Image (spheres, rainbow, N blue to C red):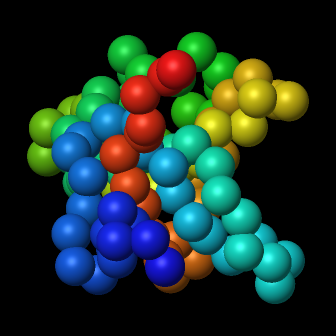
Amino acid sequence: MNSNWIKTIDRLPNNDKRVLIVYMYLGYRQISIGFYVPPKTLNAEDYFDDDIAFSECSEFDEKNDKYWVKEGWFVEIPEFEGTVLLDRKDITHWQILPELP
């Protein structure tokens, strides 16, 4: 594998930074644009404008009376104009997006 790829067990990208990710989906290796969200770093009420995404991808913090985006890897799905939270164990590698030509 190209040396630009970073194993997710070795290092994670900066919060909410779009990167190329490699993940397993239905037994096949996929590559897409995605991002990692560390715990309690993105306010879900500011981040989601869709009730379904909000309910599935946020968690309530009783101590701070706030909803946070769930920790994890999200993949962008252009066909649905949105993002999907993936199972963390399915993401194997990531790399910084290359510059556009």
Q: Tell me if residue 79 comes above or below residue 34 in the rendering.
A: above
Image coordinates for residue 77, horizontal then vertical, percent: 73, 37
Farthest front residue?
101
Quarter of the image for residue 12 reads bottom left
Q: Is residue 13 visible?
A: yes
Residue extending furthest toward the left: 63
Residue 42 percent across, percent down from the top left: 28, 33
Q: Is residue 98 left or right of residue 4?
A: right
Look at the picture and state if 77 lies above or below 43: below
- Please identify the quarter of the rendering in which residue 19 is found: top left
**Above/below status of 22 relative to 26:** above
Quarter of the image where one finds residue 28: bottom right
> What residue do we see at 61% from left, 69% from top?
23
**Residue 42 located left or right of residue 47:** left
Q: Please indicate, yes or no, whether residue 57 appears anywhere in the rendered image.
A: no
Residue 69, percent from left and from top: 39, 41
Towards the viewer: 64 or 96: 96
Kindly identify the residue that appears in the image at 63 percent across and 38 percent down: 76
Report the residue at 71% width, 64% height from top.
Answer: 30
The answer to whether 65 appears left or right of 99 in the picture is left
Q: Residue at x 43, y 37 (%)?
A: 98
Q: Residue 70: percent from the left, percent from the top?
A: 40, 51
Count of labels shown?
0
